[in-house]
Amino acid sequence: MSCVVMLVAAVISVPVIALIINRARKLRKPQNKKVISVFTRYPSPGVTKTRLIPCLGEEAAAYAQRRMTEHILERIRAYCNKRRDTDLAVWYNGSSEDKMRFWLTPKVGGYNFLYFNQQPPGGLGEKLREATLSGFRGNREYVVIVGSDIPGLTSDVMEEAFETLEGGADMVLGQAEDGGYYLVGFSKKAAHKIGEVFEGMDWGTDQVFVQQCEKAKQLDLNLLILDTKLSDVDTKEDLPVLENALRLSRRELTDRNWSVIIPTMNEEDTIADTLQTVYKNCSSETKIQEIIVSDGGSKDNTVQKVKDFSLKVNIPVKVIHSQPGRGFQQKSAAEAATGDFLLFLHSDTRLPRNFDISAESCLKTPGNVAGSFTWSVDTQSDDSWFFKLQMKIVTYFTNKRIQMFEYPFGDNAIFTSRHVYEKIGGIKEVYLLEDVLMVEELWKVGHVGIAQGEPAVTSARRWRKGGAFRISGLNRIILTAHYLGVSTETLALWYYGDKLRSVMAANKKKS
């Protein structure tokens, strides 16, 4: 039983230091003298961007809202990080603060200048009034308010707005192409007139900009207009603005599909079954753009078996050749992939039924930038009771690690969108821990969710061959050394030994 106790300790020993770093929230610094307030709505299908629903559908319209909000906040965060004198306030509707924080705050590396506020009841005028006055109550000198559906908004526009206010203007407006305005800002010296400035506007019409200018004149406010005109995205006619700014086609909004990436090295005994489960367990073959097998130089019949399988199915099954090492192989395949979603699958792991539906549903949750499946192993009837017990323990605590810490490994079949994959710079070309490094990068831009439903099932062959205690214990040692700063190349040499040295030597000769 001592072995079981040691196994439990090995499996659950996620380093305390990492837990503290990833869970602790940074203390907020004092408020700055400037604030950019962004008005947005939680991207719920059916109630978000309703004027886009007739041409996109409810899900795609909500996704468009999500992407536009993330896009503009990314630009504003970059501006705030650079200037260090400006706060960011998100004024939201349609959700709770917890959901908004989950959506717009990454798991690690959060922002200490980010504030969340529920939009007050009433019309747009009441909401704008409260956001402006709230900024001044926070002892700020300048408040700028923008919408989340202005993909063309840049740091230069925000810089111009603040420079205009600092230069002596009481009020600044950014004119929209549709007759409204996309930006409004005030200096604190105009605070006593904010109660009246938004009164009498015919919101939602092409007269709002003219009416707002006239109201400023009536109140004797020194109003200046920004040089830049921009378009918001509300209707079908506005979609080219979204497509150009975010490089997001209409097809990517409405009909996304999957590239499944499988690295192999001498897998002739497993690869055909793995490919078959991908094909059978997808909800529809039309959802699979391609299966890409990235081979690292197999000496057996792996490649031929892949080619044989490709002749039996109606989806593209491709073989590419890569330098050995999962990091190298998966990166090569990802660069060759054309799907909207990327799923990284080990050659000895079977995906669950309708994996594409559960994975895409996971990614639809605002805040989830990636995900994985829960996990199981395929113990056999002739395995000993003690081995089965060990594997139950490994399975239990592996799933706890995924659920509690958003920390899947490659065996859990990690998936993400191409958009996010490119944002984090892709998989690192390393011989070991490529999955860990990718997850750590994903934490910097969002959260790693769990697909609901059946688990992915991995072969127990590694544990059967090396012993459950030895394999799990070695994994924990490698992870702890990684947290302590040991390089992945050194760790790979520890893990693979002379086998890797020969591969590295061969690669150096080729280069």
Image (cartoon, rainbow, N blue to C red):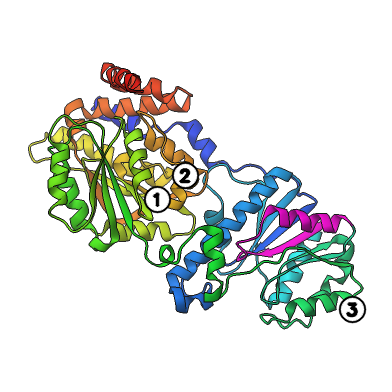
- Asked whether the residues under the numbered discs 2 and 1 touch, taking CB atoms below 8 Å apart as contact, a structural biologist would say yes
Residue 218, disc: 3
> Is 26 in front, or is 507?
507
Residue range corresponding to the magenta coloring: 141-167
Residue 288 sits in which quadrant?
bottom left
Number of callouts: 3
Q: Residue at left 57%, top 67%?
A: 41
Left/right of residue 338 with respect to residue 60 in the rendered view: left
Is residue 82 visible in the rendered image? The answer is: yes
Residue type highlighted by circle 2: Leu
Q: Of the two numbered discs 3 and 1 on the same chain, state the one appearing first in sequence.
A: 3
Q: Of the two numbered discs 2 and 1 on the same chain, state the one appearing first in sequence.
A: 1
Mark 3 surroundings: few (<14), some (14-19) or many (≥20) residues within 10 A: few
Q: Residue at left 84%, top 79%?
A: 214
Mark 1 surroundings: few (<14), some (14-19) or many (≥20) residues within 10 A: many
Residue pointed to by mark 1: 416
- From the viewer's perspective, is residue 304 above or below residue 148? above
